Amino acid sequence: MPDISDRNPDRPDPIMTTDGAVFWKGAEQHKLVVQKCGDCGAFRHPPRAMCPHCHSLDVVEHELSGTGSVISWVQPVHPPAIGFTEPPIVAVVELEHGIRLVSNVEGAEASDMRFGMAVKAAYAKTAGGKTVPIFVPDEGDD
Amino acid sequence: MSATERQAAIVGIGQTEFSRNSGRSEQQLAAEAVLAAVRDAGLSPSDIDGMLTFTLDPSDEVDIMRNLGVKEIKYSQRLPQGGAASVTTLVHAKNAVESGMCDVMVIWRAMNERSNYRFGQPMVTIDPYAKSSTFVEWCLPFGAQTPATWEALSSGPYLHRYGVTSEDLGRVSVLMRKHAATNPAAWFYEKPITLEEHQASRWIVAPWLHLLDCCQESDGGVALVVTRMDKAKDLAQKPARIIGAEYAFLYNHEIISDFYQGDLTRLEVSERVTERLTRSAGIAPCETDVAMIYDNFTPQIMRQLEAFGFCGPGEAKDYIADGNMELNGKTPLSPNGGLMGEAYIHGMNNITEAVRQIRGTAANQVANLETAFCCSGVSAAILAQ
């Protein structure tokens, strides 16, 4: 598995909103970045302007380890997903602090996929030259 | 006014034919459906003083008023959350007429969803002025671009935990098509399917959803008229009283792309609605005589059956296999064939079926019926004679 997957050169670019940009900007640096409240320290995802616990607007960027587990996975077959040469494996990955993301698992066939399987972050290029986080099986060898 | 006189009731229902290409404008479908519902009630368009629909509907109150010659309204509202809002319309209509905000509420849904939009097709862009990104921003770059994909991803943990097989899901689809087969208004009238046909239908989203696990895409319009019992007693039809209607939405959840919070093997939002509805209606969903459950995809039937208390966690697959939801079972499921078998008018055609069941005029009429349950995940209502 190369550092940056170019398996789907037509992968759609991320949609960058004012409140969500922190996540995608982190991906450009090959980091899995989520929000942490600057006051009470609570983690949150998807990104948003305000801490839902203490209502602080003070937010800091927090880099996750990148290791997690698959809590759900599917393979959209028909109609074909736009921007993918083969049906992708789409997964909900749970990371530390209970944070969950939708992403892809590459480097595994559908027949290899298991609920609870360990994965680690990798990165993929999009059609417009952006970078998004994906996951690969974590063999625990590093 | 006594509490009995003040209670809301559905007094009119109207619909166009259901098709894959209506051949006319969505505004026309809306106008036809609303006029049919108003006439069914024994009212005229000038009696309408409240108008209600939900997101994605292409027609506005302006259009309905212009077509029907409605002179003045004092309530209008457009609810969020797409098809999940179908039963939410009853929550708002009930409260609006019971509080006197308006007296005669029309609810409509009319779209050329098959010939114009194809909701089942992938999407990769959003309206740049959209007020909320929710599912699209976090899903589209990863190929999660269709309702079927979001649904399969959110249902997976439930299906996995309880060992629900594709055959189990297929039995839901077979049942819906069995009911549609004897409903002349259904798109799939006289077209039942077998479990083998379900299994042989192509994958839409592996490993959970075959083609026959998905509802149709349809063109058509449906409308309801809601008023209070003090007016209903003088109208043309036997009223379907809305004895309870409740809505809930929970922190950090989304409608179909619901992955970010809580135990994904449960529909916690529906459990909350069940608690409130049982209190307000005075009976539980499982005590009603027919169940109209929003069936965009087969796993939704199982998950809602459990969350609305028809059976315990993980029991839905056996509950269905044991025949409890057949027309002669404990609580028949969608005798019109539901959204899979009749048409996908975003849940509204399941409400019109509940009204027909209460009136005793349904194509597949349930015997000795007094109450009907309708739900769409975040909302549920109980109708009574």
Image: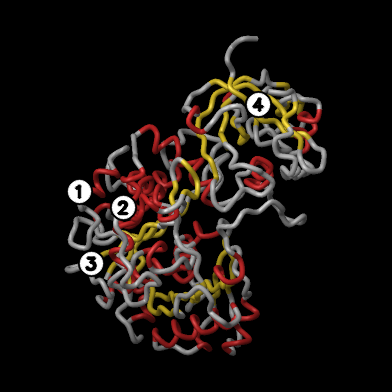
Q: Residues within 10 Å of mark 3 (few under 14, many from 20)?
A: some
Q: Nearer the viewer, mark 3 or mark 1?
A: 1
Residue annotated with mark 3: B370
Q: Amino acid at mark 2?
A: Glu
- Percent across and percent down for residue B177 are 33, 63
The answer to the question of whether label 4 and label 3 lie on touching residues, with beta carbons closer than 8 A, is no
Q: Closer to the camera, B32 or B73?
A: B32
- Percent across and percent down for residue B95 are 47, 65
Q: Residues within 10 Å of mark 4 (few under 14, many from 20)?
A: many
* Residue B117 picture quarter: bottom right
Name the element at disc 2.
helix
- Percent across and percent down for residue A58 are 77, 29
First in sequence, mark 3 or 1: give its number.
1
Q: Are marks 1 and 2 on the same chain?
A: yes
Name the element at disc 4.
strand
Q: Residues within 10 Å of mark 1 (few under 14, many from 20)?
A: few
Q: Using the image, name the chain to which the residue with label 2 belongs.
A: B
